[in-house]
Amino acid sequence: MINPVWLRTFVALSEMKNFTRTAERLGITQAAVSQQMRQLERQFGKLLIRRGREMQLTPAGVALLQYQQEMETAENRLQMRLTEAEATCGDIGIVSTGSIGLRLYPLLLDLQQQHVGLIIRHRFAPDTEVLEAVLSNHYELGLTSSKPDDPRLHASCFTKEPLELVVPANKTIDSWQDLIQLGFIDHPDGRSMATRLLSRCFPGNPGISSLPVTGFSNQVSLLLEPIARGLGFTVLPHFARISFANQQAIKVMETSVSVVDTLWLIHRQEWPLSSRAENVVSYLRQALHCTVDVPI
């Protein structure tokens, strides 16, 4: 049986890589850190190698650290089982890309108002950060626009989201020349989204680089403000557009072809969703009238 205090000290030391800083972090003396490491090394052999200011784990140290991580995973699973009845109280974390997040966050707040014991944590992030946040267990649920191929993640279709060509309410787009005259309001994913949609709607066009750029914003919640003021057009996802407050000032142009993305719900593969997470997912699917291709 491994002393849990010694194991906690070893984990902290493997992160801090310094005996003094580890002692300060744990609120103990440096001598106590050294003594606990000696006790562990009597059980498992050399765990750390020190070369000047550098510190490295030995194979035995790596194995012990992996053991601690496996114990933490097992404890998380146990906690989920013990709190199975607590579907409407406790903490739930969800991280999503910007467009779907704009639609989901008000719905999540509605749910929290219905269940005062529920604590909602929501974060906006690009796809790569969504994956990392779920893999690192900082958030139980993630929504991303690309299906991950990491075996540690379970992915299921959450909803579909079309790209939309959005113009000022008093404008009409009939040709590429109309786009040139209006000008493009760019955003971080603007060029790729515009290329995907406009290349199909206007085949043979000279490309997005031929359009004058009349503005840029990296805030998806503010992106449609210049369009509402008649300063240009943009291409962005459906949920970002419907979250804009001033709908009467903008217009979605009907296009001859559509480009529709799949949004994927992800969580860790190794353990089932908590009852809280299942409740939230069910509520969001119903609120969005989602068509689910693959069950959770």
Image (spheres, rainbow, N blue to C red):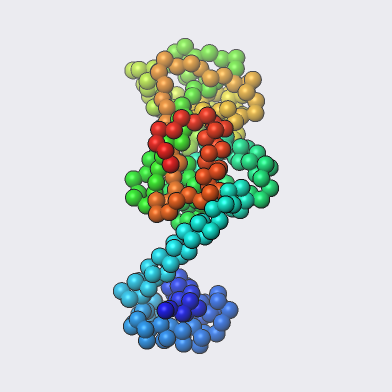
Residue 63 lies, with reference to residue 95, above or below; the image says below
At x 34%, y 50%, the residue is: 151
- Nearest the camera: 43 or 138? 43
Residue 55 lies, with reference to residue 273, above or below; the image says below
Q: Is residue 172 visible?
A: yes
At x 42%, y 15%, the residue is: 256
Q: Position of residue 69 (x, y in %)?
A: 42, 66
- Nearest the camera: 25 or 83? 83
Q: Position of residue 147 (x, y in %)?
A: 38, 40
Residue 38 lies, with reference to residue 59, above or below; the image says below
Image-based side of 58 in relation to 225, left or right: left
Residue lying furthest top = 174
At x 44%, y 33%, the residue is: 292
At x 46%, y 80%, the residue is: 3
Residue lying furthest left = 59
Total numbered labels: 0
Q: Position of residue 184 (x, y in %)?
A: 50, 26
Q: Position of residue 200 (x, y in %)?
A: 37, 20
Q: Is residue 190 visible?
A: no
Q: Quadrant of the C terminus?
A: top left
> Residue 271, located in which quarter of the rendered image?
bottom left
Q: Quadrant of the N terminus?
A: bottom left
